[in-house]
Image: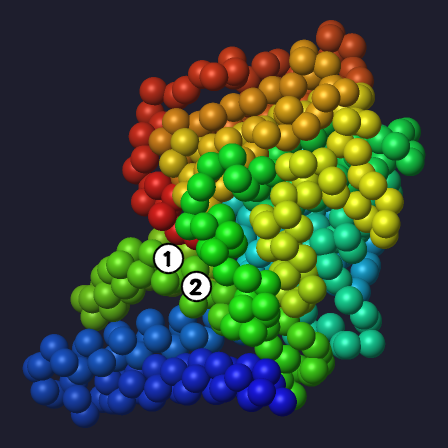
Amino acid sequence: MRGIVSYDAMETIRNTNEWMGATAKAMGSYPMFALIPHPAFHLLSAWGRVTERSFSRMVLKPDWELPPIIGDDGQDHVVYVEPVMRRAFGDLIHFRVARREPLPRKVLLVAPMSGHYATLMRSTVTSLLNDCELYVTDWHNARDIPVSEGKFDVEDYTQYLVDFIRHLGPDVNVIAVCQPAPLALAATAILAEEDPKAQPRTLTLIGGPVDPDAAATEVTDFGNRITMGELEHLAIQSVGFKYRGAGRMVYPGLAQLSSFISMNMETHSKAFINQIFAEARGTATEADKHNKFYDEYLAVMDMTAEFYLSTVERIFKNLEIAKNQFSVEGRPVDIGKITDVAVMTVEGANDDISAPGQCVAALDLCTGVPAEKKVQHLEPGAGHYGIFAGKSWRLNIRPLVLDFIDDNAALPDSVKPKRRRKPGGTEADCGLSDPLESGKMAV
């Protein structure tokens, strides 16, 4: 009962702040106050608008809202989000572009289950749609999954990936971003041993903790410092009575959001203060940079307790992937069994979530992959967010990833797409004009 009380208390605090914001917005906008030329009323209304919007976003799953794709014929092609495989804890979805023949470059984008919805990768999806037939893992909010559906831990997550990859066929190219990188590596190893014909053609790992001990960060320090008993006591709660998953043990999204914000409190505080003054001056807009980012950043989801705890214990503490000692349902997973899959790693030099060295460790684990099928890229000046959704991704990393996929495609050289970039190259204008590029936002 203690867990349920704590969970409902957090929801009550969130709901109260949303109500206070709505009340301040209404009071500050009262027509009579327009006769009093005092900036306090403008600030009250502005604070209310920012506060209500912020706290209301915390319980809403964002829509994909993908823009139409412009075809070679000049027509707009609407993008439809269609489930391909439905599972209790996550779906495999396909972004079907209307009136466009399926593209030969098939990509599965594995979204992280680390507190945010898959829509956090909206810009990544948008950037790939022009060139790829794109599929994404769409993980569900644990608070909405009834207890009767059972558990979901790192082994179940890995098996989901195995099933998704097998369903898409051997011509699929897997791109795993952040948290799923080690588990995508394990899923590929399972297919390599059990069903070699179903292996993906390429595997690209972006900023993932394959070997967390390779480079220390605040995340790895926390994982090593706290015991599993302390972590379970402090982080795990029972879903409250308001949701379908009532009674399920979870790491609540609101608790995760608190930890995200506390890591960079000064940056977030400054962003919200600036937005309040922008609202008061009348310069803020519905789709300005602040709203676009925080509408997504504040939308958090609960993680099943067993997934969160097993990730910390097995990936970060016991280093089962890094030591090639991972197992699924009692069956050892040997990453050395991967022989026919080309593997690429991407890291950001300023990544303070998965620091350089953690992801590239995957190449050493793939002892069966020939050296010519291994590629690594370290992006100068890029933080965690920038390597998959920022300027560094758009200008440098995306072209390199597409070239890597094309280089390993089963197509004659005469029909392969033209190379976009040279490995290791940089754009002259890839300076960090985007503040999110610096890696100071935890995702």
Residue nearer the viewer, 366 or 394: 366
Three-letter amino acid code of the residue under disc 2: Ser
Residue nearer the viewer, 250 or 320: 320
Contact flag, marks 1 and 2 (Cβ < 8 Å):
yes
> How far apart are labels 1 and 2 at the CA level?
6 Å
Q: Circle 2 — which element?
A: helix
Which residue does the image show at 73% across and 73% down from the upper left? 145
Residue nearer the viewer, 324 or 48: 324
Q: Circle 1 — which element?
A: helix
What label sits on residue 98 in the rendered view? none
Q: Position of residue 164 (x, y in %)?
A: 81, 46
Q: Position of residue 225 (x, y in %)?
A: 47, 56
Which residue does the image show at 8% across and 82% down from the upper left? 37
List the single residue furthest toward the bottom: 32
Q: Position of residue 23 (x, y in %)?
A: 33, 88
Looking at the picture, does residue 442 appear above or below residue 18?
Answer: above
> Relative to 249, is 152 on the left or the right?
right
Residue identifier under label 1: 263
Q: Position of residue 211 (x, y in %)?
A: 58, 38
Q: Quadrant of residue 369?
A: top right
Looking at the picture, does residue 65 appear above or below residue 73?
Answer: below
> Relative to 73, is 9 on the left or the right?
left
Location of the N terminus by quadrant is bottom right
Which residue does the image show at 80% across and 39% down from the upper left? 333
Q: Quadrant of residue 147?
A: bottom right
Residue identifier under label 2: 259
Residue nearer the viewer, 154 or 162: 154
Which residue does the image show at 36% across and 62% down from the upper left? 262
Residue 116 visible in the snapshot: yes
